[in-house]
Amino acid sequence: MIHAVTMGIGLFGLWLLLSGFLDNTLLLGLGVASCVVSVYIAARMEVVDKESVPLQLKFGVFGYLFWLSAEIGKANWAVTKVILSPRIRLNQRMITVPADQATDVGRVTFANSITLTPGTITVETERHSFLVHALTNEAADMEALSDMGARVSAVENRT
């Protein structure tokens, strides 16, 4: 039930953001009605669960996103230095990164975080590991990738 309510609130928030109608009661009512119907249909299809409405991420995700933004900025700077340097210091490699997140949402978050960080791309995912292409030795730093995985797990396991 809590997942359906959260989905409804999220849908209405998105509708409100995209429509911009705050002063017309009829349109607000129709927006609420459309969200209720959408949640009802999703519940009937049995797709409202912890994977479609990931409540387990909650508020810890904001701290993680702030940290990830800083890491993306640092990686951007490192890749820019490699590109603009007169002598390109590429050392491309494929590495296997362990992924010990408990849920699919956690694994997807980790894989996408790796891909969002410049210099690394998640090429293939397995149940407990990812194959990652790294552009340089610095991008292939297993300690940094393990730290990222631990941060995703910490956000994922918060209740």
Image (cartoon, helix red, strand yellow):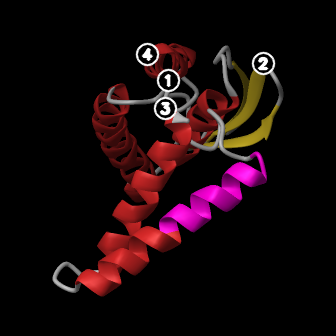
Q: Amino acid at mark 1?
A: Val
- Give the number of the disc on residue 55: 3
Question: Residue at 16% across / 83% down in the picture?
Answer: 23
Q: Is residue 76 magenta?
A: no
Q: Nearer the viewer, residue 150 or 37?
A: 37
Examine the structure image and report whether residue 38 is included in the region drawn in magenta: yes
Alpha carbon distance from label 2 to label 4: 23 Å
As helix, strand or loop, the secondary structure at mark 3 comes to loop
Real-space Cα separation, disc 3 to disc 4, in angstroms: 8 Å
Q: Amino acid at mark 4?
A: Thr
Tell me which segment is drawn in magenta: 35-46
What residue is shown with label 2? 128
9 in relation to 24, above or below: above
Q: Residue at x 19, y 78 (%)?
A: 22
Q: Nearer the viewer, mark 1 or mark 4?
A: 4
Distance from Cα at disc 1 to Cα at disc 3: 14 Å
Placement of the C terminus among the 4 image quadrants: top left
- Residue bearing mark 4: 159
- Upstream in sequence: badge 1 or badge 3: 3
Q: Position of residue 90 (x, y in %)?
A: 58, 43
Query: At 31% across and 77% down in the image, what residue appears?
Result: 28
Q: Is residue 32 visible?
A: yes
Q: Earlier in the sequence, mark 2 or mark 4?
A: 2
